[in-house]
Amino acid sequence: MFLYDSVQKTKCKFESLIEGKVSLYVCGPTVYDDAHLGHAKSALVFDLLTRILEADGYDVLFARNITDIDDKIINKARELGVSTADIAQRYTQAYHRDMAAIGVRPPTLEPKATESIAAMVEMIQKLLTNKHAYTISNGDIYFDTASDKGYLSLSNRQSQENISRVDKVSEKRNEADFALWKAVHDESVSFESPFGSGRPGWHLECSAMIEQHLVTKDLPYAIDIHGGGADLLFPHHENEAAQTRCATNHALAKYWIHNGFINVDGEKMSKSLGNSFFLKDALKAYNGETLRFYLLSTHYRGDFNFNEEDLIASKKRLDRLYRLKKRIFGLTTNVIDTEFKTALLDVLNDDMNVSKAYALIDELIASANDSLDANAKDKLYRQKLISSLAIIESVLGFGGQNPYEYFQFGLGDVTKAKIDSLIAKRSEAKALKDFAASDAIRDELTAMKVSIMDTANGTFWEIAN
């Protein structure tokens, strides 16, 4: 596998710290609102990376955190008159629901900031002891960026570029210094520590959770891969790397992977622009698998321009896969199409080249339809084809639905219930050999543009195109 490393700015051959094992950490959501398309894109990219690594034979330990204490969460709780725990739980559940809908598998570990305070306190203490942190008069603790010779080496920025990105505090030694601990002197949410009541700084949280859950002793790096959106490279990942470097005897990550931004009709997605597209709204209009197929369709490092015309065109491309699946639906196999699997992994191991992967799938569909038209009874070919579709589902995460149910998406529950009821009555009529009633029900369904297929596994239907 070759992956583009954001620090080295080149594609590098991936070599894990421990043979056969991969440790991957991705910055998860701050749970104060519903997930938007940017959250979906990042989650999908690292879900795909995990699937590829597993297909390559690696045992992957994948951690994605939940930031469940933050000023935004506190403000939302005040606004709604509920506790911060209520807000965090509500939007964590919503995030899980929306991610599951687009086929994002749960991570191996999902540490929460509020459950990792002890690890954060321990890291702060080490930084204070090592003279890489200092306390100001109000009790806040800051990381001393001047004490770290490697600061800004991750993002390759110059020090003057950093100044405009930080708040000016008179007692800070350097404009770039960032908070490790924010002292709390009122009744707002706080945690007890040797430094007094307070809350951890956002940058500190990820470093501490990685140390607590993922580190293997005596290795030069804490983890193999650290990932997240391109907007996190600076200052978040820069500050994470500095903290870990100065508090421990290892660097944070061997490889740094970042996905691009989501644009909506050409504009960078931002609530301040009024075009933040919540995933839950998209899921009302489109099958989650359709959104997955579309959002993964361009290279992960590039910015993604979300618009409905492209989404509809992408859906038609996925429809072709499901039409092929209908032709062999209900068949099983123990054959593995090693040739197709090798070809698919070859392109995906080249920095997750999904464009070439999708092209391979298009070629497979076209070839399969031709072969089935020529010889629909070729048992070995059909079994290899079933294997190929299973490989696509396993590695890319789409194509796994019942093809008839896939084409039912968008119908109202009342319509579905009516069709299911008619099909059940038709089955009863056939069982009683009342073929006149059976045919009359079929005609009624045909008038509703419902296409029926009777199989040994039951009767399936879809709205005819």
Image (tube, rainbow, N blue to C red):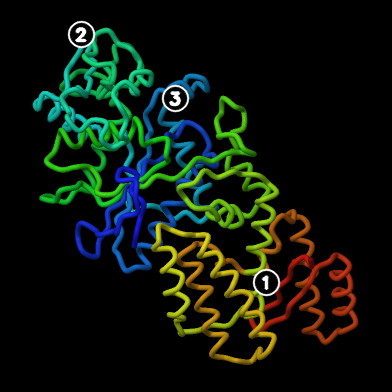
- Numbered circle sitting on residue 91: none
Whole-number angstrom distance, CA of label 2 to CA of label 3: 25 Å
Residue pictured at 35% horizontal, 23% vertical: 161
| Image quarter (top left, top right, bottom left or bottom right) of the C terminus | bottom right
- Circle 2: element type: loop
Residue named by callout 2: 137
Give the numbered dot on residue 72: 3
> Which of disc 3 and disc 2 is earlier in sequence?
3
Dividing the picture into quadrants, the one containing residue 419 is bottom right
Q: Is residue 186 left or right of residue 427?
A: left
Q: Residue at x 13, y 38 (%)?
A: 248
- Marks 3 & 1, CB-CB < 8 Å contact: no
Q: Is residue 228 left or right of residue 282?
A: left
The residue depicted at 37 percent of the width and 35 percent of the height is: 67
In which quarter of the view is residue 441 placed?
bottom right
Label 1 – label 2 distance at C-alpha: 68 Å
- Residue 297 position in % (x across, y down): 55, 55
Asked whether the residues under the numbered discs 1 and 2 touch, taking CB atoms below 8 Å apart as contact, a structural biologist would say: no
- Which quadrant is the N terminus positioned in? bottom left
Amino acid tagged 3:
Lys
Residue at 20% across / 8% down in the picture?
A: 137
Q: Which disc is residue 323 wearing? A: 1
Instruction: Answer left or right for 381 relative to 224.
Output: right
